[in-house]
Structure formats: C-alpha cells, structure tokens
Image (cartoon, grey):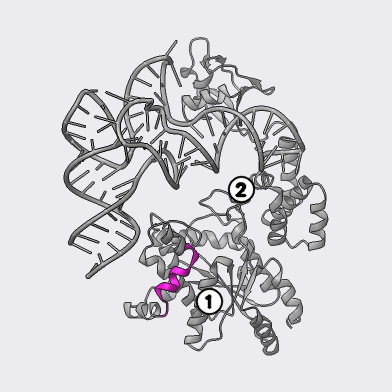
Amino acid sequence: MPFPSVEEQLAIIRRGIEQICPEEELAAKLQKSRETDTPLRIKYGIDPTGIDVHLGHTVPLKKMQQFQELGHQAVIIIGNYTALVGDPSGRDEARSSRLSLEQIEVNAKDYLTQVGKVVDLNKAEVHRNGDWFASLSLADILNLCNRVTVAQMLNRDDFAKRFRDEKPIYLHECLYPVMQAQDSVEIKADIELGGTEQLFTFMLARDFQREVGLPQQIGVMSPILVGLDGKLRMGKSLGNYIGISEPPYEMMKKFMQLPDEVMRMYFELLTTIPFEEIDTLLSGHPKDAKMTLARSIINEYHDAGAGDEAASRWQDEIGGSALPSDIPVAAISRGDLDEDGCLPASKLFVTAGLNSSNAEARRLIAQGGGKLGEDKTKIESFDQKIKVEDGLLLWAGKKKYCRLELTE
RNA sequence: GGGGGUGUUCCAGAGUGGCCAAAUGGGCCAGACUGUAAAUCUGGUGGCGACGCCUUCGCAGGUUCGAAUCCUGCCGCCCCCA
C-alpha cells in the first residue's frame, strides 16, 4: 500500500503539534520512507505508574493513531523499568514511594487496554523496556551515563527548578532521561512522540543513536494539554483530569466545567474536526460548543451515542431542574434515631455519609447548603430535628446528595 | 568529616514565650450571580451533644504558671567547605 504524498502526510502530522525537532529532517525522512516503501518507526513510551489514562495522554496517542493510518509502524514502550524511577518531568518532588515490579505489571496490562482505545494494538509493536534494561551490568550502565554531563542534566527544566528551590534531586532520577534515550536506540525509533517538555530527552536519544551509527530520530512534540483548571497541565496528581475510562456522564460534567478559553485547544488536540468548523463552533454559543466538544470526545471512548445521551442528561439535570438519576442510597439504622424517629440535622448528614464530621455539617447548614426532599427545603439550623423517613432526599450542597433508607 | 540553614494546619508561606486552632495566598467547600458546576463576588475551611472543652506546628524529652516559639537528643531535607 503506497504512502500518501509527503505534503499530505506533513499536513496531518503537523496538526496540533507545537514543535518538530529537527523540523527540516522530517520531510526527508518521509520522502525516503516513501521511496523505499518502509514505514517509519514511531515511538511512544508510557510509564505504567498509575491506572488512569487521561486526555492529556491521548494527545500523543492520537498522533500515533494518525501515523498508523498513514501506514507507519507504531512502537509502544511500556516503561516498566523507567517506572521504577518515576518520571521527574512535571513533578516538583520525587515520588515518595516507589512501585513494585508486580504492581507495575498489573498497571501495564491495564494501560494497554486503555491505550487500545486510541491506537490499533494489533498493528503496533509493544515492548517493555525491562527487556533490555533488566540484564544490564554496572559496566553497561556506566557506559550509558558516560554520555551525559551533569550540567546538561541540570539544564532540564524540572531539575533546574528543583535545584533552585532547594528541593531534593535523587541520583536515580537522573537516569530517567538516559534510559528513555536508550529505548530509542533499542527499538530504532525514527520519530518519537511526546510533550514539549521531552525535548531534552528526545535530543539525547539522537546523540545515543548517532553514537551507535543509527539514523537519528525526530521529536514530534505536542503542546501540554491544560487540565480542568485551565492553567496547569492535565495530570493525575493535580486532580484536574478527564480519564478516558470514566463513565460518560462523569466526563460530561467535567467537560462542562472547562473554562471557555481552553476549548480551542481541546478541539485542536483532541478531535479531528477541521479548523474551519472549529471556528464556526467557537463563534457560536460557548455552551453549545462545549457540548459538541464533550459529545464528540465521549462518543470516541464509549459506545456510539453515549456522548449524546450524557449531553442530554446533563441538560436535564444540571441545566434544567430534573432530579439526578443516580442518587446514591444511604442506610440509616433505626437504632440511631431518637424515640420520635428524628435526628438533629447535622448528625443526620454525618450518619448519611455526606459530611465527614459534625463540624463540617454545621458549616454546611449555616451556609445554606443543607436541604431536604425533592423540593429542596432549606434546613435552618444544625440542631433542627429531622423526621427521618424511608426515601427522604438529603442534599449537601448541589453536588452531593443521597436518598435515605431505613434499616433495622 | 566540618560549618551554616531548614522542617508549621491540603499546598505555599508568616509567626521566635501568653493577644495562636495559628496571618496571607492557592486549593477546596458553600452561597449569590450566570448559557455552564467557567469567570466574578461573598462567606467558610482541626475536632467535640460546642458562648466551653480537647488534639495539632518533624520525633522524643526538658525548662516555665504558660511553648509552634527557649534548651537537649534524634530524624529528614538544602547549601557551602573537605
């Protein structure tokens, strides 16, 4: 199957990409691949440290998918050994507790399932970098370290920042970029995908490749996707992410929280909607644009129609006044009630699990967030006696609620 | 090995003997407003059957009527010298 023309390929590759380094080599590489009918080897590495693949990860993954569609070879690296170190990027402090290999393997399997939602794994190579790192001797390791200077290392943003802030930098963390660069050598990468913060490592990989006489890879770097706060990078530890395995409605709620300003970025990086169409959407009502964004992405990671369903449900329950359709049930034992079957309001909230302490419940009520029943009658005071009945609705603010169930 | 710093409530960061459950900012929670659960504004943000009481300022002791603040030892981290 012939590859599309270099120009066509470039247009697709460049969409939503912030930097290609070195840019001028890319066309030549594509040209050569086309002439020799050899697919390029596209590398993307992930460390199985957590369990949730989120939209931030899907930015390079989607790029990978596009490369696959162009006929190139996807090479996924599961960083089961790099995970032992923990990626220093984008983190201000070293991971406090390191993961065990067993845990990492469990995560890796889970990761692949999630990655498979974007990338066609049947056509991809998957490697674990432990395959080549596990058996290295100290001499081998020294030899790798021999190629990087401390000054270079300290040039990296994350290390520089930590150094400036007088935060610890551990020696093993310095091996992270070295290992990642060596991965590129092992799998003979032509192109590596990642975020712009990877520049240093990507270039280090080029040094390594040159040293052993391999063609050098090109870094294709996406901008950092900002999280729900609209400012910081999307990340698990920051709690500002949308996971691709989250239920449709959960995703929907998160999407609608997005600040308007980041919508364009999301459209460009996470969808394949043509730019002109994005302009049209954004010039309309922001709410509608956001709905479209959410629908389109949710549909991609869930069954067809899931996005539309979630959108209309959001419209009813949040935008409108319909009752939520997923009200959790909280069991209250009759033994906890007084002789009249009542409970003071603050106590009730704690027993129902809506608040973690009596003091918290008191604050909530004092601020007008405690409400009762389908008509949301406001509770006036924390010691107000509430007659507890089966099926009573209890509201702790707008987001937390439950239906009571009396048990013996 | 020597010297100098530093460790505060979710985070950052004030506080150097009583006025400290501890300033301020961020985050978070609630309320108002809104096309939105965004932005903005307002209030709140250790616990307790609660105008009082209890626990908290790296850990363990000590001094004192009284300690986050002073002393001793230990632990972690940072910097400089070697």
Q: Amino acid at mark 1?
A: Met
Residue A194: image x %, image y %? 58, 68
Residue at image position (59%, 21%) is A390
Give the secondary structure at mark 2.
Answer: loop
In the image, is A293 to the left or to the right of A113?
right
In the image, is B81 to the left or to the right of A241?
left
Query: In front: A197, or B29?
Result: A197
Count residues near mark 2 (Cα–Cα under 10 Å), then give few for <14, some for 14-19, many for 20+. Answer: some
Residue A305: image x %, image y %? 75, 50
**Stretch in magenta:** A147-158
* Tag count: 2
Residue A261: image x %, image y %? 70, 51
Mark 1 falls within which chain? A
Is residue A154 one of those drawn in magenta? yes
Establish if A203 lies above or below A114: below
Mark 2 falls within which chain? A
Q: Amino acid at mark 2?
A: Asp
Our reading of the magenta stretch's main secondary structure is helix
Establish if A188 lies above or below A306: below
Give the secondary structure at mark 1.
Answer: helix
The N terminus of chain A, quarter of image = bottom right
Which label is found at residue A203?
1
Q: Circle 2 is placed at which residue position? A: A229
Residue A7: image x %, image y %? 76, 79
Query: In front: B9, or B13?
Result: B13
Query: In front: A87, or B2?
Result: B2
